[in-house]
Image: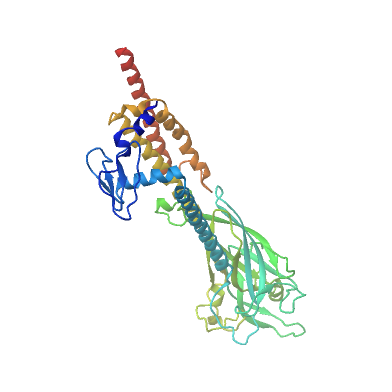
Amino acid sequence: MTEYEKGLHTPTANNTSSKPLSKGDIELQSPTAEFRFQDEKIVGDPYGKGASARKYSVFWWKETWNGAIRTGGWPRLVYCGIGVVFLGVWIGIMLGFVRSEIIYENKNLQTRAHPRDFGDSDIQFIILKGSLINFDVDKRTLAVSWSALYTKNVSEPPVEFGDLDDPHSLKFVYGLEIYRDVSSEPVNLTYQDEGDPTVHWAWTYQIDNRTAKPIGEIGMHPWDGFDTDITFTQKHPKNVWLQPQLGYPFDQWHGEIVFVANNPGLAEMFNSKGSGVMEIGGIQLADSTLNWRFSYKFKNTCAGSDPNTVVDLLTLDENTLPRSCHNKIEFDGTRPPLLIFCAIAAVVVNWTCAIFIFILTCEAIVMRRSYMLKGTDILSMCFTALFALPTIRLLLPGAPAYGAIIDLVGILPCTLVVALCAVCVSVAKLNKRSKIEKEE
């Protein structure tokens, strides 16, 4: 007869007389323990010290959980529910990042223009539309492909510039020449209308660098365009935490470009190169680059400072002209929120693992818990983490070469902590083995 079968015939196996049951009590009898659950208490001696456990106490929860595990019911629902909640939270976070990206792109697509009132004048309103191609971190250049749109008023939807099939569009016979990183200044020039021998004079703008060459032409066809590479530098020179690449993922970049549009037909009429300067009224920015966000500011000096005044770029009064006419675009580059989230999560994971291993090592060595040094569990964990933690950095999107601040904060110190823990555990195990051999 087994010990269990013997226990069934002992007097205590069927002892239910510790306390009389009242109406509504539920009795749970164990063949190896002399206690039972009643309405509010566990009656008997669960601790072997004459104590009783109240409902919702630690012992009550422990016994209830053990009983539920044996039946396999709601514990499965608990861990499945935790998994579903975690998945739902993660999907919600990702959808939030997607929504943020959509808002960012829609904001860049809105036409940025200098506030002004054209009145009843028939002025061509030309808009440059840039498409982000690529950002080269090593060369620190942003590649942008530009095309042109046209409208007579910024409140109206623009159409493709130079499209003869669209009645709302406009075509320039000679096209418009686009100059980069130059400006224009007022000059007094003479001209003659066709068929009129009278010589007229007027104030207009002329490109200040006569040797500059155009980088592209627009306005003759809807597919006309040109490409530019914009150089970026550090936005905050005195802040090392925002320095490009070194401050990853919080680094901030800044770049700018200046455009001047010139009508070669007007320049031919004035018989002076670069003297047909026209205004670019607005800017749009489309598309996005992986692991980067670029916002921009647009400044149109041709429009003047008074939004209620129409500036005629061909006038007899020099005082009505602004001091210069060009279009300046300033770009700011930052990392998207999703990338920042991933970088912070990687640092948190690294430090959590390093601290956990450090605590286990201290418990085993400092607190002399020798049972933790048996086997190779803690030692194998240290060496696994030693090679696993640095590889987490490879998962970071858009991470620069090794040496950024994130390496000094979240990668290198964690690796050093784990390496020291591995050495300490190895020495402790060797010392323990040496003592055992001496005792033998």
From the viewer's side, name the closer residue of 55 and 106: 55
Residue 312 visible somewhere in the drawing: yes
Residue drawn at the location 63% of the way across and 67% of the way down? 129
From the viewer's side, name the closer residue of 243 and 37: 37
Residue 335 visible somewhere in the drawing: no
Residue 11 found in image quarter: top left
Q: Residue furthest left?
A: 50
From the viewer's side, name the closer residue of 274 and 414: 414
- Residue 103 to residue 308: above or below: above
On screen, residue 5 versus residue 233, left or right, reads left
* Quadrant in the picture for the N terminus: top left
On screen, residue 185 versus residue 434, left or right, reads right
* Quadrant in the picture for the C terminus: top left
From the viewer's side, name the closer residue of 101 and 433: 433
Q: Residue furthest bottom?
A: 120
Residue 438 found in image quarter: top left
On screen, residue 41 versus residue 419, left or right, reads left
Residue 6 locus on image (x, y percent)? 36, 29
Residue 425 locus on image (x, y percent)? 36, 27
Residue 341 locus on image (x, y percent)? 47, 53
Residue drawn at the location 33% of the way across and 24% of the way down? 428
